[in-house]
Amino acid sequence: MLRLKSCPSSIAELEPFVMNLTTQHNVKQDLFPNILISLTEAVNNAILHGNCSDTSKKVNIHTTVVNGKGLSLEVMDEGCGFCHETLPDPTHPENIETVGGRGVFLIKQLADKVEFSSNGACVKMFFKF
């Protein structure tokens, strides 16, 4: 488990965390970027949107190896959540030039499975080995 302070500088802790995790579990190197980008997007959203950059709040990351077949990463913030089903499609022509709004889209493209719970305050990402 990794527990981060809700400030943007906490993002710097993710790369060594993912490096250690992938090395420890012999994850193929070609999965490293997908895991790192997805985790970075999820944590960034948790810090900025979930916890509103309130440094008294934390972002928790839990990892689990699932039956030796994949890696599950769960990111939880202390916010009230959001409805992931109503996010605008960033590939829609009217949203192409919009700044931001691509994090959840990227996570869904890079992870093999994505689940939201706790009203959106928790995102669980699964990556097949």
Image (cartoon, rainbow, N blue to C red):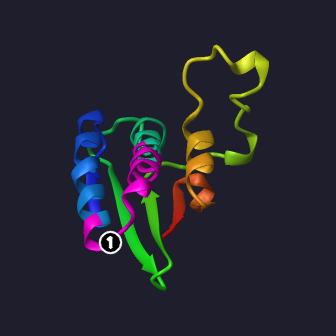
Quadrant of image for the N terminus: bottom left
Instruction: Give left or right: position of 119 versus 76.
Output: right
- Kindly indicate the quadrant of the structure image that contains residue 119: bottom right
Secondary structure of the residue carrying tag 1 is loop
Q: Is residue 24 visible?
A: yes
Instruction: Give left or right: position of 35 versus 19.
Output: right
Depth check: give the residue in front, 96 or 83: 96
- Kindly indicate the quadrant of the structure image that contains residue 18: bottom left
Which residue position is annotated with label 1?
Answer: 26
Report if residue 38 lies within the magenta region.
yes
Return the residue found at the far right: 93
Residue 85 vs 26, above or below: the answer is above
Residue at (46, 50) in percent of width and height: 34
Return the residue found at the far bottom: 67
Residue at (63, 40) in percent of width and height: 105
| Image position, residue 84 (x, y; %) | 67, 46
Could you tell me what secondary structure mostly forms the magenta stretch? helix
Residue 64 vs 48, above or below: the answer is below
Q: Is residue 55 visible?
A: no
For label 1, the crowd category at 10 Å Cα-Cα, with few meaning under 14, some 14 to 19 and many 20 or more, is few
| Image position, residue 89 (x, y; %) | 73, 32
Residue stretch rendered in magenta on the structure: 23-40
Residue at (33, 38) in percent of width and height: 54
Looking at the rendered structure, the kind of residue marked 1 is Asn
- Kindly indicate the quadrant of the structure image that contains residue 98: top right
